[in-house]
Structure formats: C-alpha cells, structure tokens
Image (cartoon, rainbow, N blue to C red):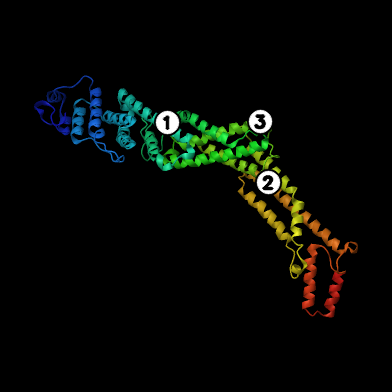
Amino acid sequence: MSGEQIGVGRIKLEASAVEAMGDEELAEAFEYIPSRATLHYRELVHTAVAHDIVDKLRPGTPDTVIPLSTAARELLNQLAIAWRISGPYREICYLDAINNRYVRGDLPITYLLDAYGKIERIVHLINPQEWHTAQYEYLLEIQSDIEFRALGNVKDIIEELDHQRPEKSTNLKRLLRILIINDVNAPAALNKPMPNIAGRRNDVMETLEPSIVYRCDCMMRQCFTDDISPSSQIDGYAQLAVLILSDYERCSKIFADALFEDGDRRFDVTGIVAQVEAEYFYTSFKRHIDQFGYKTDSADIEVGLELCKSITKIEELHGRYSEQKLEGIDSRRLFKATASTWLDNIDREKYQWADNALKQDSTSRELDIGKHSTSVIDLVSCFSQQATKVQRLEWPDVEMRAWFLTEFMKFVGQCFDVYAKVMMRQFLACLSPAEATATEADEPQSPVWNSMWNSRKYKEQSLSLSATTLAALTMLDQ
C-alpha cells in the first residue's frame, strides 16, 4: 500500500480529518480494523523500515540518516489514528524495527541513536505510569536488550583498556547517556537532578564486575613475579596502584560525561571501574599486610613512599564514588612505618654527609687563595634534595604531616650538630703543635682552615699594614 489508496472510495484522508471523526465515521471510512491492531501495525513499521531505509542504504554514508518516505509516514499515521495506536507505541515500534536491523548489521548505530531521539520526546511528554502495561513492557524489553549489548561493548573495552582510543567510543557513550535519559523506570527530567535509584547502578556494577576483576588479574600478573619476598611484594603493589590510577584516567577520557556525575550515576562506568578496582587492590594488599605486617625495612624506600602516595589517592578516589569506607589497611600506620624507615636511613648517613661536605674544602692550595669554606652550602644542598622528596608526599592527614616534619627537623638539627663538632675538632687540631706537620711551621693543616689562613696571608701581602695591626694579627695567631 502506498498510503494514497485507503479508505472508502479509495480517497486519501488527511490526518487532521481522521482525528476529528467519531467512531461511527471511522467505521464507515475504513473498510477493515484488525482484531490485533497493534501487532499488525508493528509489522507494517518493520516492512516500511526494510523498504524505505535498509534497501536504500548506500555504503560509505553511515552518518546520514535516511527517513521513512512521505507515503509510508502518511499511511502509518492514518492507521495509527484509525486503529487507536497510541503515540508512545508508534515510536516504540520504530525503535524496535531499527534495533533489529542494527543487530543484524543492516544499519549503523547512527540510526539507533536517531530512533532514541523520538523516544526521548515521548518519555518526557507522557507519564510512563499512564502507559498501557503491554506498551510499557514492550519498551522495557527493547531497552533491556540494547542495554545488554551496550554493556557487553563496555566490558570489551574494560578488558582491553590499554589499547582503546577514546574517540572510537563516542557513539557508545552517547548510547549510555540515552539509556539514562529514557529509562522508563525513572526518566531524567530536563534541567532537573536525576532521580536517585541505587539499585540500577548496582545492577550495572554486577554486570561489569567480572570484566573489571579480569582486568585487575591481568595487571596483577604484570606487576608480580615468582619472588615472594616482602621487598618484591611492596614493589609489585606500588606498580599495581599506579596502573589502577591510570585505568581511572583512561576511563575518564572514554566514558566521562557531566550527566554521569549527578544523581545515581546508573551508567557511570568510570566510577564503577574506580570503585571495583580500588576494592580489589585493598583486598589483595590486606593479604600481604596479614602475612608480613607493616614492615618496610627491606623494601626500596622510594618505592614505599610512592606506594603510600598512591594509596592515599586510591582512598580519595573510592570515597568519591562509594559511601562505603575501605577497610583492612591502616594507611596512617603504613605511612608512619615507611617514613620512619626513611628517617632512619638518612639518620645513618648524617656523618657521611658532614664528612663529604668538609672534603669539598680540601682543594689545591693554589686555588684556596682568596676563597672561603663551602661545606655549609654543600650540606644544605643535601637537605634540599630530601626536601624535594618531602614535597612529593601525600599526607594522610594534618597530624601525620606535623609528626613527620617534627621528626625531620630533629634530624636536620642533629646533622648540623655533627657538622659543628667535626668543624670544632678540626679547628682544635690545627691549634695543636703535636699534630702540626705543615711545611711551614705557622700554617694549619685542616682543609677547612687552610682557605682562611691563605686568604689572610694573601691580604697581608697585598696590603701595607701598620705595626699595631701586625701586633694584633700576631696575638690572634697565638
């Protein structure tokens, strides 16, 4: 049928005229009204889509949506009015036809997104609670089927997250957004907060969780070797924490959308991945803590500090998407144990730092003339390098920061005390006649004081000093 030959006398009826007719006029105007009009109407829509869209689709134009022909639209409109087919059901039949053709591979996803655009108007203009039960179940069945396939694509992306290109997932992200907006259980009203339905997000998480756990297992095998020593384990967990944070960044680029950050976030894939991977990490690392305790003595201290930093970020990330607090690991205790080990390590080096700084003063005599000691500057440079590490740390809280800085400043004071004692010992050594082995009887041998001595002699030779000044200098030498 073309839509131009229908009704009594084969006269074309305008849609407005059909709407104005009463039941008796409709009965006279149409020769046949089937007993199961909705099923007949659905088959007509599928036939129209096959004839007007699928048969005319040309390769190379996936983004160009071909609409139904004018004749088909007029025919379907008149039959919908005559057979009492509601507006929501008309659009649902079209969505069903497009979805079936998309599943077969006859149509690109662009048509599915376009069909959902028509559903969006229906869902928001008509209260779903007023729909006929059969129509409601029909739309719910189609959306469930589309959601199942969309989440299947999401699972594939998660399992191969290292090899994804965000721009290739644009249509999938649009489809997830459409599923949120047109959820007949709780449609999201425009310019209003989304309804909070925690159960829907839990359903999506339950679907995606096996793929996320599989992704975590792959990362575990990548980070850990056959070596089960505590130091090797700490290094492995530090790498795993970095990979989990990287996964979150990748998911943010692929699935992030402002709509997902509001309400119940039913399809907030980024948040679901962050929550499941954070809980996976905590569960695995807790087993290590139960076996070895909070010991970092044998581990690389740099790796331990980076692990503490990553754990703090993971805790913050999990708290952003879940109200349930992570349990099993005392991050403050782990940070304190790692920081204490680091402080103990640098405490053992304070004598070496002081000696190395003082050795920098023992340059050749010819170069010492007119120069001064640089050992203090060299020692301060050692502290500057450690301060850079301190600035990179992620403090669990203000109390831990205060504790660490107090302990670090105690170490700084002790190191300068060691330096001062060494300086004093060298000063006293240069005054002792028994230890004097200089080629000149009046020249001190300590490298720290050589520079000061030669500098004074250079000034004496270059300046004409008075007898009073020379007498004062002699007394100072004594």
Q: Earlier in the sequence, mark 1 or mark 2?
A: 1
What is the CA distance from the residue labelled 1 to the residue labelled 2? Answer: 48 Å
- Element type at marker 3? helix
For badge 1, the amino acid type reads Gly
The front one of 278 and 69 is 69
Q: Earlier in the sequence, mark 3 or mark 1?
A: 1
What is the CA distance from the residue labelled 3 to the residue labelled 1? Answer: 37 Å
Residue matched to label 2: 404
Residue 323 visible from this viewpoint: no
Q: Is residue 5 left or right of residue 297?
A: left
Tag of residue 447: none
Nearer mark to the viewer, of 1 and 2: 1
Q: Residue 250, image x and y in percent?
A: 48, 41
For badge 3, the amino acid type reads Asp
Residue matched to label 1: 152
For badge 2, the amino acid type reads Phe
Q: Is residue 199 above or below residue 337?
A: above
Residue matched to label 3: 290
Residue at 63% from the left image edge and 52% from the top image edge: 388
